[in-house]
């Protein structure tokens, strides 16, 4: 046990050292003045026990304690005093001393005290060691969780998340119940008129389900990549290969649910293996295959004409509980009324969710919107400020919310696409320089449309656009620097074109 004694009396220092030696303590450090004491103690933070005299030359024992107690919370501190004032002793305990002794040291009592202190310090050291080990375990776990999330996001990479083209609006929702999720979503645009979508749900929990689901998804991604590369995509062959491959990775007691969807112009081809039914504007399309098992042989592929809406989901959505019944009952009533996926997911939060939830929602955009305002302006401070001021002076419904959204969008466009400011957190950490050369030829257009249900905003500019993958990473990274979380929170629907140069924002009226 390492012991330090601070007292301005040399005779007492020799005396207490002798007494401590008698009862078996050898690692003893003596100090007559405060400066040497402070210097030594901060160089030896593993000191176990400190004796501090109350009456010193420069400071008193209370002042010494106030300076060190924050930095030495687990060091046992004993005040030495010849003063018999009980108020002084009471104050010593209140301020943070663990004990006090009289300068007329009784050897038996000192030994009894230090035996107790020794056991206490041993216990504290054990607790601190366990605490440090736990801290290291948590840090390792957090690091692994971060890597797992990055790996999951890299494998999924949904191309059709927050995406629009001339045919459809695409939205996805992924809410894993645990870090190691058995659900995966994969969406990909194959060409101008065709799309591939999969929602996979591995039965079970934890690592086993996650490995199965992401392994199956990785196979799909690779198969599609090669099919596009060799220009020989065939949905029937893809489904058959997927089942044959998945069977080889399953254990005897495992099953895998999956919805594999191929949209070609107006036709939907589907092979659903045990997943919930597909919902369209007018009907419920039941699953047409049993879940995939090691014994699966028969595969059924069917088709239907696409309608205004199509919802593909894992069973976490259907099996949530709402008012003591399955959410599916509420979903059937709600689905015909919803315009955007946000309405459904916000309503879903009112229910009790027991499983991962994955949703892909596809809608045909309505063309009954009337243009009510159009703006064109330079992408510089003056141009942006003038536009936002003009916007506020219009009678457009929900104009305050529209103003807020466009202010956020323009601020981020100006910072990232014009001033070339990188991620703000990265900028802060790396102290990067900022290029303030502004391209004064860049312009933006804002068109605002309205129908009886929605305000639609179309934003377009002549910059290089937003980096789509960074936009999608906004939901997985704390610092993304694009304002997408805020805009998504304020709007009912938010969609980008393929290269991020055109944005559609919808607000319900």
Image (spheres, rainbow, N blue to C red):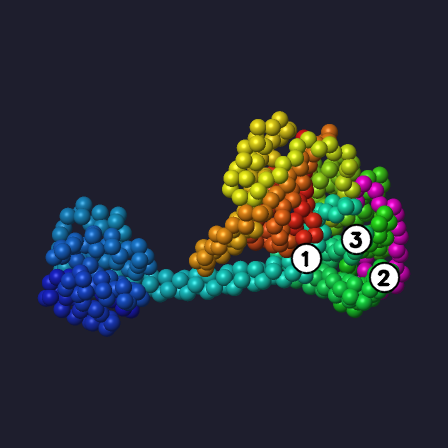
- Quadrant of the rendered image containing residue 42: bottom left
Disc ID at residue 234: 2
Q: Secondary structure at mark 3?
A: loop
- Residue occupied by mark 3: 192
- Report the mark closest to the observer, 1 or 3: 3
- The magenta segment is 291-311
- Report the mark closest to the observer, 3 or 2: 3
Disc ID at residue 306: none
Q: Position of residue 122 (x, y in %)?
A: 35, 65
The residues tagged by marks 3 and 2 sit, at their Cα atoms, a distance apart of 16 Å
| Mark 3 or 2, nearer chain start | 3
- Residue occupied by mark 1: 157
Horizontal relation, residue 140 to residue 30: left or right: right
Q: Are marks 2 and 1 in contact (CB under 8 Å)?
A: no
Q: Secondary structure at mark 1?
A: loop
| Mark 1 or 3, nearer chain start | 1
């Amino acid at each position: 046990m390492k012991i330090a004694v601070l007292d301005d009396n040399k005779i007492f220092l020799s005396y207490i050292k002798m007494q401590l030696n008698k009862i078996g303590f050898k690692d003893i450090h003596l100090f007559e003045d405060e400066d040497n004491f402070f210097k030594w103690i901060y160089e030896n933070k593993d000191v176990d026990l400190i004796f501090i005299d109350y009456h010193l030359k420069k400071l008193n024992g209370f002042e010494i304690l106030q300076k060190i107690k924050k930095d030495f919370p687990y060091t046992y501190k004993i005040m030495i005093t010849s003063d018999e004032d009980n108020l002084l002793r009471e104050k010593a305990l209140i301020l943070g001393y663990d004990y006090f002794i009289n300068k007329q040291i009784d050897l038996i009592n000192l030994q009894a005290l230090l035996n107790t202190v020794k056991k206490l310090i041993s216990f504290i050291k054990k607790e601190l060691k366990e605490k440090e080990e736990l801290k290291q375990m948590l840090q390792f776990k957090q690091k692994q969780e971060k890597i797992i999330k990055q790996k999951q996001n890299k494998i999924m990479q949904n191309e059709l998340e927050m995406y629009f083209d001339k045919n459809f609006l695409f939205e996805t929702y992924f809410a894993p119940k645990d870090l190691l999720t058995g659900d995966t979503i994969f969406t990909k645009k194959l060409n101008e008129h065709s799309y591939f979508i999969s929602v996979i749900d591995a039965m079970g929990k934890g690592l086993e389900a996650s490995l199965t689901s992401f392994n199956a998804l990785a196979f799909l991604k690779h198969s599609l990549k090669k099919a596009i590369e060799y220009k020989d995509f065939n949905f029937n062959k893809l489904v058959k290969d997927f089942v044959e491959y998945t069977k080889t990775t399953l254990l005897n007691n495992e099953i895998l649910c999956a919805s594999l969807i191929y949209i070609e112009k107006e036709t939907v081809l589907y092979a659903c293996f045990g997943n919930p039914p597909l919902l369209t504007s007018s009907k419920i399309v039941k699953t047409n295959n049993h879940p995939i098992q090691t014994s699966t042989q028969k595969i059924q592929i069917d088709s239907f004409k696409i309608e205004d809406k199509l919802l593909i989901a894992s069973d976490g959505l259907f099996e949530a509980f709402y008012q003591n019944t399955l959410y599916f009952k509420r979903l059937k009533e709600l689905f015909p009324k919803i315009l955007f996926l946000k309405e459904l997911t916000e309503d879903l939060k009112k229910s009790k969710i027991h499983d991962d939830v994955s949703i892909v929602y596809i809608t045909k955009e309505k063309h009954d919107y009337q243009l009510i305002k159009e703006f064109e302006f330079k992408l510089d401070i003056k141009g942006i400020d003038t536009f936002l001021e003009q916007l506020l002076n219009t009678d457009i419904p929900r104009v305050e919310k529209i103003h807020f959204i466009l202010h956020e969008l323009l601020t981020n466009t100006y910072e990232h696409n014009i001033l070339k400011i990188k991620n703000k957190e990265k900028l802060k950490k790396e102290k990067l320089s900022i290029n303030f050369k502004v391209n004064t030829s860049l312009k933006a257009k804002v068109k605002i449309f309205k129908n009886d249900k929605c305000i639609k905003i179309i934003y377009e500019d002549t910059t290089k656009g937003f980096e789509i993958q960074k936009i999608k990473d906004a939901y997985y990274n704390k610092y993304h620097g694009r304002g997408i979380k805020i805009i998504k929170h304020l709007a009912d629907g938010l969609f980008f074109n393929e290269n991020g140069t055109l944005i559609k924002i919808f607000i319900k009226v």
